[in-house]
């Protein structure tokens, strides 16, 4: 546990403890996320991945410990301050799409931009662009309840990426998807992170998906089991090199 | 016994629903027993006792309406309980009968309390002013009050059972709710309202006073013509049926053009909920319009006010308002996911509150228009 974090850590936490109604979820976690990297947080169900992402993304207040974003404290922020931070700096994709059912796909994607005060035209242009990139451009004007789950999840990914936030949190974003769609969504998330220098924190229960990350940490019962293991950056065609990187992380 | 175990987990809204059902059914039972008492003490026969019984139907319908709306809201409000029962093997029919049984139990309790009061008062306690209403002096056939009072729990229970939505068998399964209105659903109320308006205008034309036999209105409202009454009834029904589509259009109007997030959320939300909010709000608007018109007539015409219709109006009004409250609670719990998603995006609670306020304002304006039109037509028909 270093006293001062490295300068290139965009987000770091020290000794965070969090429990849900007495059930401990995180028991003292220290972690640093470097700018522009893809960090995978792996672990089985109930290991505290979602809680860790919630604490890092200012969704949940921590019980103990510190969270810093860009050298500014997050753990001392008020509720309004955390809302502002989430709206202006963070994007979030959950395992459920959580779209607003009465809004069309493009309105859902444009909503974070509109909330942040962007103009109508800019917001909808960005929304159309991201929907196009995620192969759901042709259903942009449909409402979520007419779409299948994989389309809804792509819309949720587009919504998180459209404002180009410095940090994107993805909490098991591939849970509702088939393998092919899951690979595509993860490729788009990671390539967006690389092309736009976004930091991506990816929680997943599937150790196979670690091949998309630059670095991986494993979480068991609310504790980090191993120090962050470096993972080789996935090459353009992950199918061929996937096995070797996975075996590298399992050392 | 099983039901009593479930009732131990009750919170304030459940208790309020229970008590309100019991209270309303007690009042309906009082109306029914009064008509029985009158029939026993007058012994005239003919149409008068039947008409008196028929006038117990609006409060009975109001209780059934409230029971139905409240029962529909139960699964949405207590998802954990329904999921637990389903996981324990209870079929959707079992859950349906459980909720209906709960409503019937509350109604039975209210009715039995009224019956006890009725029997105690009959025992020479009531003064001479109440004697004819209680049928004092005449022997009470045991089957009559039991039959009458069984009417309340049976009606409310059946209404509740029919209203409980069939549960999704898969936990977390989403039901897709339709939001639009078919063209027939829009054309029919418009046609009704227009035909009704035309009928009423014909009835109100100068020199129409000699048209046919006058209709005697209840509650001391004097007389009117058949055409005026029929015209008002048709247009009121049309306006009530039109409330849902009107709310949907109001929502579209709110989100017209290039909406800000506030207008977008308020407008689209209203359009999506118009189907569900339309019915209870339409009933409430209709009841309020009728009651206000009646009160205005009573104030304008001396010695026309009547105590019993006033009590009846209070009961119907209370049930209609409680039904709206139950539906609002249902919509609110149903949208908890959406609210969470919006908060997660960083939407400020102030914006969400503003959207609700704007939506309420829009709904209020729409209802003011339909309710005002209904009341104006009713006031014009009364002479």
Image (spheres, grey):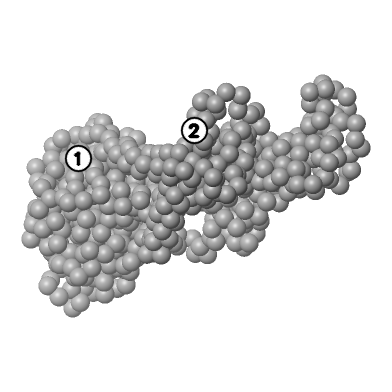
Residue hosting label 2: B292
Label 2 environment density (alpha carbons within 10 Å; few <14, some 14–19, many ≥20): few
Disc 2 chain ID: B
Going by the image, does B372 lie left or right of B97?
Answer: left
Q: Residue A85, which numbered label?
A: 1
In the figure, B191 relative to B66: above or below?
below
Q: Residue B25, which numbered label?
A: none
Residue B38 pos. (x, y %): 80, 36
The residue at the point 68 percent across, 42 percent down is B56
Q: Regarding mark 2 in the picture, which secondary structure is present there? A: helix
Mark closer to the observer (2, 1): 2
Q: In the picture, which quadrant includes the C terminus of chain A? A: bottom left
Going by the image, does B171 lie left or right of B182?
Answer: right
Q: Residue furthest bottom?
A: A240
Q: Regarding mark 1 in the picture, which secondary structure is present there? A: helix
The residue at the point 72 percent across, 42 percent down is B52
Going by the image, does A128 lie left or right of A77?
Answer: left
């Amino acid at each position: 546990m270093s006293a001062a974090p490295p300068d290139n850590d965009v987000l770091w936490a020290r000794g965070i403890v969090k429990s849900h109604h007495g059930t401990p979820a995180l028991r003292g976690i220290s972690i640093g996320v470097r700018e522009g990297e893809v960090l995978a947080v792996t672990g089985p169900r109930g290991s505290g991945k979602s809680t860790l992402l919630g604490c890092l993304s200012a969704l949940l207040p921590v019980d103990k410990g510190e969270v810093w974003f860009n050298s500014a404290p997050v753990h001392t922020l008020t509720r309004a301050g955390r809302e502002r931070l989430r709206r202006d700096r963070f994007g979030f994709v959950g395992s459920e799409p959580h779209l607003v059912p009465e809004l069309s796909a493009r309105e859902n994607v444009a909503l974070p931009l509109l909330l942040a005060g962007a103009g109508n035209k800019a917001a909808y242009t960005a929304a159309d662009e991201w929907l196009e990139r995620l192969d759901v451009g042709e259903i942009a004007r449909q409402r979520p309840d007419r779409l299948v789950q994989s389309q809804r999840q792509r819309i949720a990914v587009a919504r998180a990426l459209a404002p180009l936030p410095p940090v994107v949190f993805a909490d098991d974003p591939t849970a509702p998807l088939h393998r092919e769609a899951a690979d595509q969504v993860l490729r788009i998330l990671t390539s967006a992170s690389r092309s736009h220098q976004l930091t991506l924190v990816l929680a997943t229960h599937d150790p196979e998906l670690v091949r998309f990350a630059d670095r991986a940490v494993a979480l068991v019962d609310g504790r980090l089991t191993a120090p962050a293991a470096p993972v080789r950056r996935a090459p353009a065609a992950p199918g061929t090199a996937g096995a070797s990187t996975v075996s590298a992380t399992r050392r | 016994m099983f039901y009593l175990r479930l009732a131990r987990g009750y919170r304030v809204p459940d208790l309020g629903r229970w008590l309100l059902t019991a209270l309303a059914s007690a009042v309906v039972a009082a109306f029914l027993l009064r008509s029985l008492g009158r029939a026993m003490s007058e012994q005239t026969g003919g149409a008068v006792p039947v008409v008196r019984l028929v006038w117990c139907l609006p409060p009975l319908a109001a209780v059934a309406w409230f029971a139905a709306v409240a029962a529909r809201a139960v699964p949405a409000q207590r998802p954990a309980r329904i999921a637990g029962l389903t996981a324990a093997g209870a079929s959707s029919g079992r859950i349906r009968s459980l909720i209906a049984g709960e409503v019937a139990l509350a109604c039975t309790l209210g009715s039995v309390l009224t019956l006890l009061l009725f029997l105690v008062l009959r025992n020479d306690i009531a003064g001479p002013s109440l004697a004819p209403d209680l049928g004092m002096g005449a022997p009470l056939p045991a089957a009559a009050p039991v039959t009458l009072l069984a009417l309340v729990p049976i009606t409310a229970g059946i209404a509740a059972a029919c209203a409980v939505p069939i549960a999704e068998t898969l936990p977390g399964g989403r039901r897709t709710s339709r939001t639009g209105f078919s063209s027939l659903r829009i054309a029919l109320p418009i046609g009704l309202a227009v035909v009704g308006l035309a009928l009423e205008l014909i009835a109100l034309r100068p020199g129409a006073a000699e048209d046919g036999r006058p209709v005697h209105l209840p509650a001391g409202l004097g007389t009117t013509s058949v055409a005026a009454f029929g015209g008002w009834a048709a247009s009121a029904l049309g306006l009530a049926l039109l409330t849902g589509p009107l709310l949907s259009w109001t929502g579209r109007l709110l989100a017209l053009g290039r909406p800000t997030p506030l207008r977008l959320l308020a407008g689209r939300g209203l359009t999506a909920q118009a189907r569900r909010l339309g019915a209870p709000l339409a009933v409430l608007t209709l009841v309020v319009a009728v009651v206000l018109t009646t009160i205005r007539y009573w104030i304008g015409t001396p010695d026309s006010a009547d105590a019993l219709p006033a009590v009846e109006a209070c009961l119907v009004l209370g049930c209609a308002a409680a039904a709206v409250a139950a539906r609002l609670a249902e919509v609110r719990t149903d949208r908890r996911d959406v609210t969470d998603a919006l908060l997660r995006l960083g939407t400020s609670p102030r914006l969400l509150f503003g959207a609700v306020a704007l939506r309420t304002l829009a709904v209020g304006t729409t209802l003011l228009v339909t309710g005002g039109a209904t009341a104006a037509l009713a006031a014009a028909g009364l002479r």
